[in-house]
Image (spheres, rainbow, N blue to C red):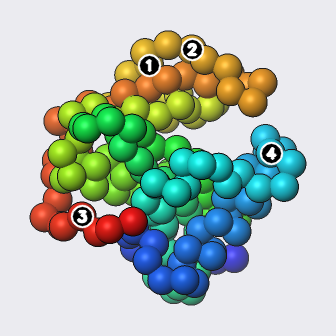
Amino acid sequence: MSFPTSYQFKIATSPNEIAAYFALRRLIFAEEQQLFLVDDVDEIDAIAYPIVAIASDTQRVVGVVRIYETEPGIWYGGRLGTHPDCRKGWQIGKGLIDKAVTTANTWGCTQFLATVQLQNVRFFQRLHWQSLEEVTICDRAHHLMQADLAFYPPESQTREAS
């Protein structure tokens, strides 16, 4: 796969985008990382907003993340991943994180959290996140991290029904 020069970061809304979103999550978290046996779909998906990175040259979904509100103002991001063929550099991951946090901030977020795999903690710290505590998920080390909302200003978009 060649590397496109740009990506679109958006909430997945079409049936094709949503199918590609779940297929890429399955590839990353079940097949590649083997964190789950078949796929990584869980009860949170019923309330989560799926966000995708779409390559401008191929229109393929090459990155994924989900966001969800657990109580008023408290948002989480999760299942952040980039297609194995597109992991050169940090453009996709950074763009997905930015879209996730700015979207939640637009929708009234007062705290944005994520559990981040140990190998990605430094990347998140460079993007103005701080580690709150170490946790173990699926027998792997993670950090519960919090975004500095001042670095992720609200956008001018409306909230869509999930």
Quarter of the image for the N terminus: give it: bottom right
Residue 13, x across and y down, in percent: 43, 77
* Label 2 or label 3, whichever comes before in sequence order: 2
Which residue in the protein does label 3 denote? 159
Residue 45, x across and y down, in percent: 55, 55
Which residue in the protein does label 4 denote? 36
CA separation in Å, label 4 and label 3:
31 Å
The correct choice, above or below, for 86 with respect to 123 in the image is below
User: Of circles 3 and 1, which is in front?
Assistant: 3
Left or right position of 159 against 115: left
Residue 111, x across and y down, in percent: 28, 31
CA separation in Å, label 2 and label 1:
8 Å
Q: Amino acid at mark 2?
A: Glu
* Label 4 or label 2, whichever comes before in sequence order: 4
Left or right position of 153 against 123: left
Q: Amino acid at mark 1?
A: Ser
Q: Amino acid at mark 3?
A: Arg
Which residue in the protein does label 2 denote? 134
CA separation in Å, label 4 and label 1:
25 Å
Q: Regarding mark 2 in the picture, which secondary structure is present there? A: strand
